[in-house]
Amino acid sequence: MTQPIYTRPAQPAGIHIRPATLADLPTLLEFEQGVIAAERPMDPTIRQGPINYYNLPAMLANPDVHLLVAELDGALVGSGYARIDPARHYLDHTHHAYLGFMYTDPAHRGKGVNQRIIAALRQWAHSRHLTELRLDVYTTNEAAIRAYEKAGFTPHLLQMRLRVI
């Protein structure tokens, strides 16, 4: 008997995962600032002042990006995307799905929002015949690491840095 590739986790009541649209842009920009605010204490190289990580309109228009939102009672409570990226030439796959912009509104953390988004992105990647998901997480972001491990991710590579002054 063949095991299923993926079994959907129990769904929190009322949370709906759907593709993002341009109408979601104002909330997505707020989510982006939430990601930046959370990451600044972990990364001294993020410059101060207003910044953006993403070109959200371009991501929404890109067929190789699947940007999802989690909606509860008509309000957006989370986001995440998968982007098809080429793999390094020596790996056993030619492309993988890179996950990013994983954000859950603080009032809705612990309700499985991130797990639902990851599950939907995993299904999208599988439908594109991708066999690998990858993401980056700060080593000091223990809550995120636990959430990703719960979704099946394992630590793989530690990127190191040294500022040359």
Image (cartoon, rainbow, N blue to C red):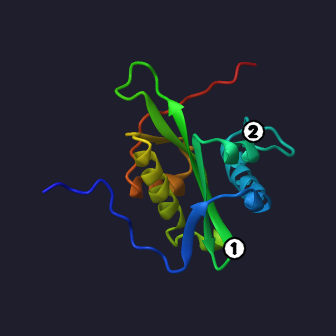
**Pointer 2: residues within 10 angstroms few (<14), some, or many (20+)?**
few
Q: In the image, what residue occupies the spot 49% across and 68% down?
A: 112
Q: In the image, what residue occupies the spot 59% across and 54% down?
A: 80
Left or right position of 19 against 135 = right
Q: In the image, what residue occupies the spot 39% across and 45% down?
A: 154
Pinpoint residue 33: horizontal percent, then vertical percent: 76, 54
* Image quarter of the C terminus: top right
What is the three-letter code of the residue carrying label 1? Ala
The image quadrant that residue 150 belongs to is: bottom left
Q: Nearer the viewer, residue 155 or 70?
A: 70
What is the three-letter code of the residue carrying label 2? Ile
Pinpoint residue 40: horizontal percent, then vertical percent: 72, 46
* Image quarter of the N terminus: bottom left
Q: Is residue 85 above or below residue 29?
A: above
For the residues marked 1 and 2, what is the alpha-carbon distance in whole angstroms?
A: 29 Å
Which residue in the protein does label 1 denote? 75
Which residue in the protein does label 2 denote? 46
Q: Is residue 113 above or below residue 44?
A: below
